[in-house]
Image: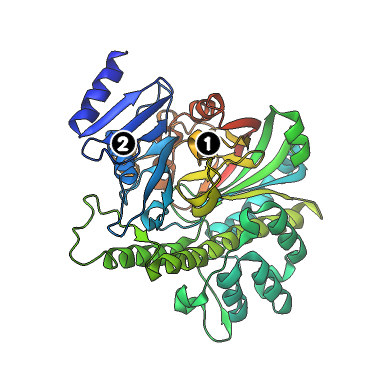
Amino acid sequence: MQPQLKRLLRALAREGLDVSYDGTAYSVRLRDAPHAPAAEVLLPPNLKLEAKAARQLASLASVRHPAGGRVRRCCATPDVHPGDSGIAIGSVVQTEDLLIPQAVGSDINCGMRLHTTELTVDQYLGRKADLVGRAKGDYLLGTRDVAMSAAAMQAMFAGGIGPWVASMRREAHGSLCHADLDQIEREAVQRVAEAGGRAGDPALAPQTLVPDGGVVRDDGLGTIGRGNHFVELQAVREIRHGGWAHAWGIRPGQLAFMIHSGSRKVGKAIGTEQWRRAREAWPDGQPYPRDRIFAVHRSHPLYDGYLRAEATAANYGFVNRAVLAELLRLRLREVFGDLEAPLLADLPHNLSTFEMGDDGVRRWVCRKGACAAHADQPVVIPGSMGTSSYVLVGRGAPRCLSSASHGAGRSRSRGAMGRTLRDASHRQALGLDGVDCVTLREERLIQEAPAAYKPIHDVVDAQVRAGVVDVVAVLEPLVTFKA
């Protein structure tokens, strides 16, 4: 065993964790929770397991409720790192008779969306300035116009993309008057997880967004969001699986665009409220969970209530990504004429889903910063704005609860990046050489620089070796929009 690994295991033991490592994955359990399943962390030897993330995973695996219910399985993807809410980013948990709102978090249905286009990179470069200028206006300068009727907002929260499109056909406003609603609806059915909608409840949405009538001007819908969220134009640089690439319409030299965003302030409001309710619903007289992870037992009305609330926020996330994509698709057509830019996939990575287990029983699986990777489904793993992104195909690996990483994962916090490199003059040290990032906030270049992230190639390779995914294509960034 390498000395560095020995030191890590000793340090984790001092944290009250029983930890082992087989060269591919760590097994982590709280020493005083022998009833809990061990959390398995898929991680190659060259990527460090942080003690805080290990503790958070072991705590998540130990969650129980006084009325019954338990965690059956808990694992983490190679991009795992500590989360601010007490749940590690990159964690996946399968539960029995309980739900864990914190295991989804407040950015409900954050996810990835990938479109391919008919354009070659050379064609794009010939009109780059025009396209980037228009997109910058929409994404950063507030020139987008996504006003819509109160009825459309109600339909969106109630059912996601399908009902929203139906309402927009009756009454559209602003930029979306020019949207191809038939295409959006068709793509949702064929290419968006769960057809882009769940059974939500407008009464659970922020009430300023669901008035009885009139036109709503929501300053969140059609926006990227902060942190690691982005819209990025990319080039298809390499095809590694010709069969899947052909089936999905991916070609070398092709222009593509990728979107990483979620439910914005709606998810934050709903997620925070549901965490508060879960805490208040904890049985009287029972001590709070030591790590303040509050589960909801299926016998409590909040169980179904949480699922409706999560669905309401998820519907907003689905429509938000669809709007972000349609704004860019409209700009592409303004600059390059009538062209196709079809959706390849829209994939959530902060959501509870009801899935078949390897024992043939359906249970809830909560993913936080991890995406589903079921057999033969597309998987999108973005790099940082200076590194490759990957299109992959899932293999449905039971060991990882059919889950893959949602990115490379942070190796340095935003605060640490700001303290050590306070401006963008250290471009080489930050990994920013050659990076084209359009942003109004210079600190984004530092906080989200490639140096803040784990090596994406190592993260992907670990999952390929473990049989989680296979690589279909490699994409390189051309220009990234960061709010």
In front: 29, or 121? 29
Image height of 167 relative to 47, above or below: below
- Tell me, for residue 105, which label it has, or none: none
Labels 2, 1: front one:
1
* Alpha carbon distance from label 2 to label 1: 21 Å
Image height of 208 relative to 175, above or below: below
**Residue 91 appears at what percent x and percent y?**
41, 43
Q: In the image, what residue occupies the spot 30% across and 19% down?
A: 5
Image height of 109 relative to 115, above or below: below
- Tell me, for residue 54, which label it has, or none: 2
Q: Are marks 2 and 1 in contact (CB under 8 Å)?
A: no
- Tell me, for residue 398, which label it has, or none: 1
**Residue 43 appears at what percent x and percent y?**
42, 28
Q: Secondary structure at mark 2?
A: helix
For badge 2, the amino acid type reads: Ala
In front: 241, or 295? 295
Q: How many marks?
A: 2
Question: Toward which corner of the image does residue 445 lie, by quadrant?
Answer: top left
For badge 1, the amino acid type reads: Pro
Q: In the image, what residue occupies the spot 28% across and 63% down?
A: 279
Work out whether mark 2 precedes mark 1 in sequence or the reverse, and give the earlier one: 2
Rate crowding at label 2 as few (under 14), some (14 to 19) or many (20 or more) other CA atoms within 10 Å: many
| Side of 130 relative to 59 (left or right) | right
In front: 266, or 93? 93
| Side of 204 relative to 153 (left or right) | left
**Residue 433 appears at what percent x and percent y?**
50, 31
Q: Secondary structure at mark 1?
A: helix
Question: Toward which corner of the image does residue 100 lie, by quadrant?
Answer: bottom left
Q: Is residue 179 visible?
A: yes
| Side of 460 relative to 41 (left or right) | right
